Image: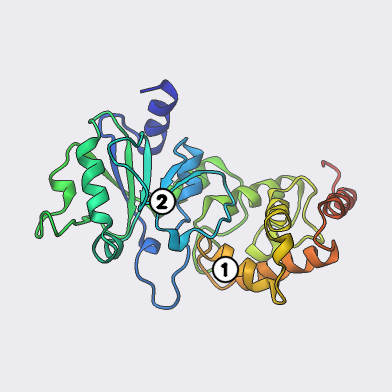
């Protein structure tokens, strides 16, 4: 195991003994309304160096606000895949979509030094076709359980100067959005709500908030929809907890339209905002 990977597991979990990590994130599982924010944990894990990720293609809309290597669970050869791995899967996904077979195969294939991080919606994930009454955390040891919301909250408070509330009601528990807020806060740009982070009339020219616009231009230029906000909204849904998705999509669509879906005009437009800030 490389020193970088060893350092990543230590910084994430506070220990290096257990390499099987089970992180509980309720947003991976069932939702009262529409499913959303199933992938919100990935920016935190990628920040610690874990960027090879397995998850259902139902959540893969090709939009990645943070870069990672996507592995389709239906195409993985468990005997050849390399660790470390992150696997985002709900208990329903384990049972209804039979990802339990992949999980069991990976658990048996890995050595105790191979890092396997499972993000799921329960503290005791089960593979009932193998052990109906027991969680696999009781079988495969050593392991460590973590609560995603507690971890990301403490990480944001210890490492960032974010003005965005660490709450799913008024802000977000996705590290990506807090990194943008931290960036804006440093230069006095609007930083305390999700829509303000993506207000392109005031976003600093070097803000990460501009990057998704380039993605949509480069990937969708030939298939511009009449209602482009729906395309953006769908892309953001797997990363965002609450109803501000529509407002963010509207802001993005407005700037894309203003720049006629051209990267050169996006470049020019973002540079204009430099005059708003003395430290940019």
Image position of 256 (left or right of 106): right
Q: Which marked residue is nearer to the observer: mark 2 or mark 1?
A: 2
Identify which residue, 109 or 10, lies in the foreground.
109
Give the quadrant of the N terminus: top left
Residue 154 sits above or below residue 164 on the image: above
The 10 Å Cα crowd at callout 2, few under 14, some 14 to 19, many 20 or more, is: few
Label 2, secondary structure: give it.
loop
Q: Of the two numbered discs 2 and 1 on the same chain, state the one appearing first in sequence.
A: 2
Residue at image coords 40%, 38%: 12
| Residue 265 image position (x, y, % from top left) | 87, 54
| Residue 8 image position (x, y, % from top left) | 42, 32
Label number found at residue 234: 1
| Residue 144 image position (x, y, % from top left) | 26, 42
Residue at image coords 54%, 40%: 159
Contact check, label 2 and label 1, Cβ < 8 Å: no
- Residue 254: image quadrant is bottom right
Give the quadrant of the C terminus: top right
Residue 7 sits above or below residue 256 on the image: above
The type of colouring in the image is rainbow
Q: What is the CA distance from the residue labelled 2 to the residue labelled 1?
A: 19 Å
Label 1, secondary structure: give it.
helix
The 10 Å Cα crowd at callout 1, few under 14, some 14 to 19, many 20 or more, is: some
Residue 121 sits above or below residue 147 on the image: below
Image position of 50 (left or right of 128): right
How many numbered markers are drawn? Answer: 2
Label number found at residue 72: 2
| Residue 260 image position (x, y, % from top left) | 84, 63
């Amino acid at each position: 195991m490389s020193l970088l990977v060893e350092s990543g597991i230590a910084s994430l979990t506070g220990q290096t003994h257990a390499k099987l990590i089970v992180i509980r994130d309720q947003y991976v599982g069932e939702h009262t309304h529409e499913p959303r924010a199933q992938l919100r944990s990935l920016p935190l894990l990628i920040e610690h160096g874990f960027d090879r990720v397995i998850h259902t293609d139902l959540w893969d809309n090709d939009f990645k606000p943070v870069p990672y290597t996507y592995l389709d669970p239906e195409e993985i050869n468990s005997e050849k895949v390399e660790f470390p791995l992150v696997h985002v899967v709900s208990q329903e996904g384990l049972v209804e979509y039979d990802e339990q077979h992949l999980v069991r195969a990976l658990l048996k294939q890995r050595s105790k030094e191979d890092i396997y991080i499972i993000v799921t919606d329960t503290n005791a994930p089960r593979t009932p076709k193998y052990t109906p009454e027991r969680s696999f955390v009781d079988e495969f040891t050593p392991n460590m359980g973590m609560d995603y919301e507690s971890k990301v909250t403490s990480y944001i408070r210890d490492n960032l100067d974010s003005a965005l509330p660490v709450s799913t009601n008024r802000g977000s528990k996705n590290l990506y959005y807090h990194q943008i807020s931290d960036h804006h806060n440093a230069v006095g740009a609007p930083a305390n709500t999700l829509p303000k982070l993506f207000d392109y009339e005031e976003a600093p020219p070097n803000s990460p908030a501009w990057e998704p616009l380039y993605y949509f231009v480069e990937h969708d230029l030939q298939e511009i929809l009449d209602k482009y906000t729906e395309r953006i909204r769908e892309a953001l849904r797997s990363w965002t907890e609450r109803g501000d998705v529509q407002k963010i999509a509207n802001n993005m669509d407005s700037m894309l339209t203003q720049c006629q879906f051209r990267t050169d005009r996006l470049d020019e437009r973002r540079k204009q905002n430099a005059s708003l800030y003395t430290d940019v």
